[in-house]
Amino acid sequence: MSNLKAAVIGTGFIGPVHVEALQRAGVDVAGILGSTPEKSVQAADTLGLKTGYASLEALLSDKSVQVVHIASPNRFHFDQAERSLRAGKHVVCEKPLAMNTTESSQLVRLAQESGLAAAVNYNIRYYPLCLEAASQISSGSVGQIFHASASYAQDWLFHSTDFNWRVQSDAGGALRAVADIGTHALDLLQFITGRKVESVFADLATVYPHRERPLGGVQTFSDEREQNLETETIPVTTEDYGCLMLRMSGGARGVLHVSQVTAGRKNCLRFEIAGSKKSLSWCSESPNELQMGHRDEPNQTLIRDPALMSERAARASTYPGGHNEGFSDTFKQLFRDVYRAIESEEYKTCSTFPTFSDGHDEVALCEAVLKSHQQQQWVHLRESTL
């Protein structure tokens, strides 16, 4: 049981996931903040929490809370993270960290100056077999990395009548499919391979230049989308699909495609990494299997089992082999990592969890993707000046 206490901002899809994962990680959750006092109280009642905060000021003035989790819409992340750090709270923020690199760089500097832990929730890293893939590559058993490919496909925006705040650039940012789900795949490729994206060539497509927005709004992945709601037609400039070519450090090449309009794919992230000794491939729809490909011997499938994996991957496995772990467990494992680092103060010298610097790099990569698409040419990511 952690000695730290958390509070969560956001009552939509991801906020309650944070609450449940924190509780499973042994962290006491003091309360939750929604977009209105009424939503805060309703969410607190539903989730069994003591407090539904009336405002951000009320949350930040709660002296019992040491860590703030930010799971609100993208446009609020910068302000809420800044105010939380200035209030002396450690922060775990959903990605994107901010809406642009001006904001994200400010948050990186503020986190460094504050001496507080500042994490970004790249939870996909914490699937045990993704950690295992990273361990195998760092150990040299995969060899030189030739190339890496990834895809992330969903269908929750398949119809023109499907709507969420993320499709609007003023709420979610100029990029959507790439920024919303593609960044998870980009972070995962870079984390596992240990190679940074240095240049990008992007081609984006908006399948529906207009969508029907329900008057009153709906939640992400909510069945409300299927009801006959009164709507209004609004223009959409954010992409439903994106294809990226990547040049990575060490000479590796990569490719990524993302889609939120692929029928039948509810939440499918895949990667395949080709090395000079073997290849590795994994799919989030079968997260407890890692495929290892060979040229001169039979291929192998590693079923998630702590007894058969690296130390880091084994630590992120709560259950023995044959007892599947999935999406919600990745949040728990990331939070365990963050809270362990806070309590030991290990984060002050090195961080095993994704930090605000990682979040800033993601925002910079998204800006490069958008520039590449607009100019239809390769864009090089300049070295960070942080």
Image (tube, rainbow, N blue to C red):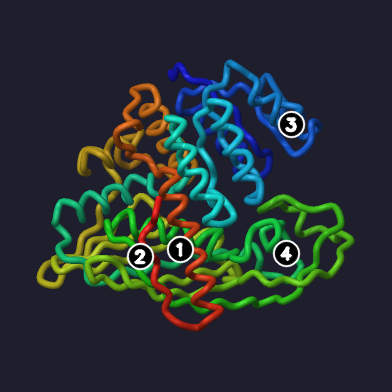
Question: Quadrant location of residue 234?
Answer: bottom right
Type of the residue with mark 3: Ser
Foreground disc of the pair 3, 1: 1
Q: Please state if 312 lies on the left or on the right of 108 as rendered.
A: left
Please tell me how many numbered marks the rendered image carries.
4
Q: Please state if 13 lies on the left or on the right of 125 as rendered.
A: right
Pointer 3 residue: 40
Foreground disc of the pair 4, 1: 1
Type of the residue with mark 2: Val
Residue contact at pointers 2 and 3, CB within 8 angstroms: no
Residue occupying the far right of the picture:
230
Q: Is residue 133 above or below residue 205?
A: above
Residue 32 image position (x, y, % from top left):
66, 29
Foreground disc of the pair 2, 3: 2
Residue contact at pointers 1 and 2, CB within 8 angstroms: yes
Query: Mark 4: few, some, or many residues within 10 Å (few <14, many ≥20)?
Result: many
Q: Residue at x 35, y 32 (%)?
A: 347
Pointer 4 residue: 162
Image quarter where the N terminus lies is top left
Disc 2 or 4, which lies upstream in sequence?
Answer: 4
Element on which disc 4 rests: loop
Element on which disc 2 rests: strand
- Distance between mark 2 and mark 4 Cα atoms: 32 Å
Query: Mark 3: few, some, or many residues within 10 Å (few <14, many ≥20)?
Result: many
Question: Quadrant location of residue 65?
Answer: top right
